[in-house]
């Protein structure tokens, strides 16, 4: 357990780039995990958790309550996070997102990575929740040919641009000596600025965004109006101070590392990787596909080595349309399985388990980590990584 198949079988059956043609509930998937009903199979799920085996929990009423609130009322989170406060958001001109970290540099120049290294296309920007929602709704609307979703995105965009114009006009009026919006009186230059603004907006509409919100107990306790306080109030099942609510998901409350929320748009994929801690992942709106692998498959995953900016992540293009030609031979033999998570589902993922993520629609996902186990450490060490 769990059952597993080759990457050629699983990814060949359903290419990660395919997020529009067949709905997950009508597609045959290579699902290897057990599903447990929180209301009737709690003890069985607990046994799997104690054995550090992955599984999915559903029908947990406290999770369902939050999922219904977030998913059933699309404007709920928009009202909470608004159109002014900006959050760290990942941006990419394509659907693929690869984690990387470039620290330091020399002689005042940024670190460009090891020789021959090419930085992934994705980077980070600051973005309001309202703008992210606008772009995510538009991607869903385009894929589904849903005019209502497209109109919602259009209204959000018009409101954002209107507010931006007011903000920019106010800034110009505050500048010393500025009497009007075109202080240099150069029509050609002003036209150029307008075109650049149009191009910027078009680029934004083509881009893909991964909205991030990290909550921590310190911020939640010191500022009751903070985003952290809101997340902990909404997700008591991830709050280590509320043991009655969180004792199943937060296994080791002394090792909790906050709540990390990632709101994705249709088509976004996150590169395959492993984390050196147990992870509990709740989907609170929309759908996500996870392709999973046991840590004993580590040597077949084509991982970047220690010291690489994308350490612990796979160098293989999982979305390749011609896997037989582009994939390494040992990766073709790697054994994986998959699961499609819906709003209200919670995935328990033990330490070091590999996961590749596909966002099947606009979705809300939050996860929490709580401690490290070492039953799979030998497999990770075989790949050249140390378990602390």
Image (cartoon, rainbow, N blue to C red):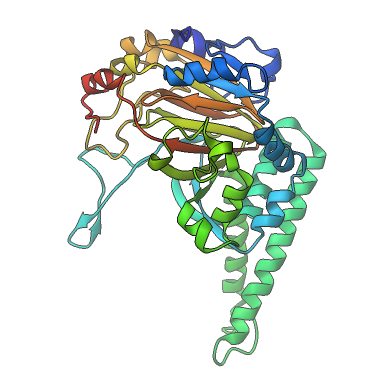
Q: Where is residue 242 in the image (x, y as percent from the top left)?
A: 55, 43
Residue at position x 57%, y 33% from top? 282
Left or right: 61 as drawn, with respect to 312: right
Residue at position x 65%, y 33% from top? 361
Quadrant position of residue 155: bottom right
Left or right: 84 as drawn, with respect to 385: right
Direction right: furthest residue: 148
Q: Position of residue 350 (x, y in %)?
A: 42, 24
Quadrant position of residue 146: top right
| Of the pair 19 and 5, the residue shown nearer to us | 5
Q: Where is residue 369 in the image (x, y as percent from the top left)?
A: 44, 36
- The answer to whether one can see residue 321 in this image is no
Across the whole image, how many numbered discs are drawn on residues?
Answer: 0
Q: Up-down: is 270 above or below 292?
A: below
| Of the pair 48 and 368, the residue shown nearer to us | 48
Q: Position of residue 176 (x, y in %)?
A: 54, 91
- The answer to whether one can see residue 5 in this image is yes
| Of the pair 217 and 124, the residue shown nearer to us | 217
Direction front: furthest residue: 244
Quadrant position of residue 384: top left
| Of the pair 176 and 198, the residue shown nearer to us | 176
Q: Up-down: is 261 above or below 61?
A: below
Direction left: furthest residue: 107
Residue at position x 48%, y 7% from top? 3
Q: In which quarter of the image is the N terminus?
A: top left
Q: In which quarter of the image is the C terminus?
A: top left
Left or right: 353 as drawn, with respect to 155: left
């Amino acid at each position: 357990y769990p059952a597993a198949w080759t990457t050629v079988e699983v990814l060949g059956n359903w290419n990660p780039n395919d997020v529009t043609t067949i709905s997950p509930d009508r597609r045959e998937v290579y699902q290897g995990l057990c599903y447990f009903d929180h209301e009737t199979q709690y003890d069985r799920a607990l046994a799997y958790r104690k054995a550090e085996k992955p599984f999915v929990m559903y029908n947990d009423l406290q999770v369902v309550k939050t999922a219904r609130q977030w998913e059933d009322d699309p404007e709920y989170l928009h009202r909470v996070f608004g159109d002014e406060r900006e959050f760290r958001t990942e941006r990419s001109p394509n659907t693929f997102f690869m984690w990387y970290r470039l620290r330091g540099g020399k002689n005042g120049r940024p670190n460009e990575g090891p020789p021959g290294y090419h930085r992934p296309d994705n980077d980070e920007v600051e973005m309001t929740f309202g703008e992210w929602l606008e772009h995510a709704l538009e991607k869903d609307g385009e894929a589904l040919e849903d005019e209502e979703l497209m109109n919602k995105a259009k209204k959000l965009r018009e409101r954002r641009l209107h507010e931006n114009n007011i903000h920019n006009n106010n800034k110009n009026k505050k500048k010393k000596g500025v009497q009007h919006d075109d202080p240099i009186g150069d029509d050609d230059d002003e036209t150029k600025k307008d075109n650049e603004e149009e191009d910027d907006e078009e680029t934004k509409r083509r881009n893909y965004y991964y909205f991030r919100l990290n909550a921590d107990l310190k911020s939640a306790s010191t500022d009751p109006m903070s985003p952290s306080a809101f997340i902990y109030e909404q997700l008591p099942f991830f709050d280590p101070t509320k043991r009655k609510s969180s004792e199943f998901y937060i296994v080791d409350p002394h090792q909790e590392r906050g709540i990390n929320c990632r709101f994705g748009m249709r088509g976004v994929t996150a590169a395959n990787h492993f984390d050196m801690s147990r992870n509990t992942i709740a989907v609170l709106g929309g759908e996500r596909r996870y392709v999973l692998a046991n840590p004993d498959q580590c040597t077949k995953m084509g991982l970047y080595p220690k010291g690489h900016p994308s350490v612990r992540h796979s160098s293989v293009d999982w979305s390749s349309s011609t896997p037989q030609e582009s994939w390494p031979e040992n990766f073709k033999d790697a054994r994986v399985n998959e699961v499609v998570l819906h709003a209200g589902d919670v995935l328990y993922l033990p330490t070091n388990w590999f996961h590749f993520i596909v966002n099947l629609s606009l979705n809300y996902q939050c996860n929490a980590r709580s401690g490290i186990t070492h039953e799979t450490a030998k497999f990770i060490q075989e790949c050249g990584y140390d378990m602390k």
